[in-house]
Image: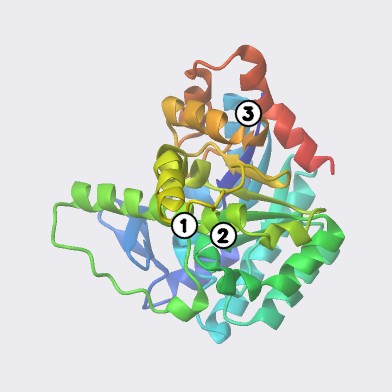
Amino acid sequence: MAIDFHAHFIAPKLMEMLETRESDPRISDGENGPLYHMPVSTLPYSRAYYDMAQRIEYLDHVGIEKQVISLPGLLGVDYLPLDQSLPMVKASNDGLAQECAKYNNRIYGLAALPLADNDAMLGELKRCVEDFGFIGAILPNNSFLSLDHANELKPLFKYANEKKLHFFIHPGWRADEFPVLDTRPSDPDELLIARGALGVQHTVSLALITLLYTDFLNAYPDMTVHIANLGGTFPMVVERMHHTVEARFPDAKLPPCRKENLYFDTSSLGPRAIELAAEVYGVDRLIVGTDTPIFSAETGLRVISQTRLSDDEKQQILTQNAHQLLSR
């Protein structure tokens, strides 16, 4: 069995709102079925996003005992202007809350927040935690591309620390980046997807620099944070980064690649990447992330089994580390 900390859900009410929109994010009818349009990409859309009964059957089938669920970070709902984002994130959170109540102790909610207004963000987080029992929130990694951006979220983190919440840092945009313009080259679709996948992971790594190498998180020891996709490309390039910093600043010593309240999910979907992350961060920092329904849970679990880690280390990743997070 496994506990999955990276999975997504689009509430039926939010789906209805997205179907009426003329600009992205939106849902439309495609030749081969519904599509959801994000600011710079389009993905097939199916019942797997909104049918929780079907989801539970699927989790039973693949061996996932608990799942922590959030709005898809790259959908682009939360970064819209406040008059657009607030009704939609409320619809998303209300719908997820209904499913959490129905499948108590099986499904756990992370709140979507209206990123355009800090007071509205804090208010919606409080509503979701105090009224619905959500365990935290999802935030875009672009909010951590600099320490200045991160510091704007201090009231949010202060509340999260008081309540011992969990924040999920996922690829996504800040509200001041609206609208995101599609500046991709006119390459074949498969090349665009490949470039986009690498670009997203690079941005995740840049956010990790703020969270790992500054004292920002030190002020919030009673909350936990996890970063998607093994922290992006960071495990592969951390040695060169350290050499580069020390070559320019001989007296500089970057801290170790771990903080006790910082975790990483395995949704890179590759066994060698998971092995490298275990070496860089420590096995006790890794938790399962399948990124369903965008990717299959079977793939997310299979890549862990395919690693050359010991059976005990695999079990740490599959359940033990996540159990500790959920039991705080």
Residue lying at 61% horizontally and 21% vertically, measured from the top left: 314
On the rendered image, what quadrant is the N terminus found in?
Answer: top right
On residue 165, which mark appears?
Answer: none
Circle 3 SS class: helix
- The amino acid marked with disc number 2 is Thr
Badge number at residue 206:
1
Question: Marks 3 and 2, how far apart in space?
Answer: 22 Å
Residue wearing tag 3 = 283
Which amino acid, by three-letter code, is at mark 3? Val
Q: Residue 323: x and y, percent? A: 77, 34
Residue at left 57%, top 49%?
A: 253
Q: Vertical placement of 38 versus 310: above or below?
A: below
Q: Nearer the viewer, residue 18 or 243?
A: 243
Answer yes or no: do the residues labelled 3 and 2 have beta carbons within 8 Å? no
Marks 1 and 2, how far apart at CA:
7 Å
Q: Which residue does the numbered mark 2 point to in the structure image?
A: 210
What's the residue type where badge 1 is placed? Leu
Nearest the viewer among 70 and 142 is 142
Task: Mark 1 and mark 2 in contact? Answer it, CB < 8 Å.
Answer: yes
Q: Residues within 10 Å of mark 2 (few under 14, many from 20)?
A: many
| Label 3 or label 1, whichever comes before in sequence order | 1
Tell me if I can see residue 45 in this picture.
no
